[in-house]
Image (cartoon, rainbow, N blue to C red):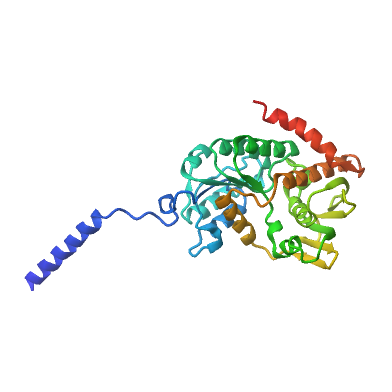
Amino acid sequence: MKTQMKMKRIAVLAMGLVLAALPLLPLAGAAQQVPPGKRIGIIGLDTSHSPAFVNAFNADEPDPALLGYRVVAAYPYGSRTIESSYSRIPRYTEEVRARGVEIVGSIAELLEKVDVVLLNTNDGRLHLEQALEVFRAGKPVFIDKPVAASLADAIAIYDAAEHYGVPVFSSSTLRFTPDVQAVRGGSIGQVTGADAFSPATLEPTHPDLFWYGIHGVEILFAVMGTGCETVSRLHAEGWDVVTCRWRDGRVGTFRGLREGKTGYGGTAFGTEGIQVLEYEGGYDGLTREVAKFFATGNPPVTAEETLEIFAFMAAAEESKRREGAPVSLAEVMEQGRREAATRNDG
């Protein structure tokens, strides 16, 4: 019996020595488990979009359409001045850390660990500075809404991306809902007009529609396309109605909601039908497009269209100042380009 117990102890000891000699396995989601080229870094944990992206890319059984990309590192900041944003950072930091994401202390440190970037900072005023750091490192980047807190900064971001030769795109997830994509694919023939709506919560640091109204504006442009020329805005405490005439004579409207029942959606009118644009929530469409963009470098939304969206919102802001008078997008784009030139000087 003593001999048997001695033999068992020897066997256990030997097994321990074998296990000790093996390399330690990395934690789930750690950077060394992800193939080079597939490592995502997040800038900004001050928005619910960041844990949503992590939950998608770092799922136990991720969507095959996400092509094996995983979030491996995140820099939390993010706004330091907008309370509704920075108050979220501690909670979201812990949420993504639990998914195997390494938390780093700077964008520079992040860029050393990743191949592609999700710039999710909720405060659009920070995007130009943060994006420039990413562009200089040559990393493809998706910039979450709003791409910037001014038309001039948005122009400067796309000019800088072109200068550095770095792929970039920005979009609301509302663009990639099934109804919107069906209309873009011709389900109702040629689109003759559209109405869109979304919440339009105001944030004093951003022009009115830039902060949240952009979701509904993105729906409008996703189905109408580019070519908006003149904007008029009616503003009240609880709502906004912005009307735009396209160069081919079509008319589109956006309604921003701040009181009563709110939601996302609209109606598209076409030569062969009328489509109600419903939104059931979720990020599946956007995350798939982001993964495809990272893999190909081809943005699903052009710089031209994104900048026209921001010109639309800037013109709506100017129309509000002029008490609803029409404002041309050409006017605000000219002013925006002059200001953008000073942002990227040198």
Is 142 drawn above or below residue 289 in the view shown? above
User: Is 15 on the left-hand or right-hand side of 140?
Assistant: left
Q: In this view of the protein, which residue sits in the foreground, 56 or 256?
A: 56
Quadrant into which the C terminus falls? top right
Residue beneath the point at 46% across and 54% down: 100
Q: Quadrant of residue 3?
A: bottom left
Residue 160 lies, in percent from the top left, at 64, 35
Asked if residue 268 can be seen in this view, the reply is yes
Residue beneath the point at 79% across and 49% down: 226
Residue 191 lies, in percent from the top left, at 82, 60
Asked if residue 263 can be seen in this view, the reply is no
Residue 345 lies, in percent from the top left, at 67, 26
Q: In this view of the protein, which residue sits in the foreground, 87 or 172?
A: 172
User: Is 256 on the left-hand or right-hand side of 302?
Assistant: right
Q: In this view of the protein, which residue sits in the foreground, 100 or 284?
A: 284
Residue 332 lies, in percent from the top left, at 82, 37
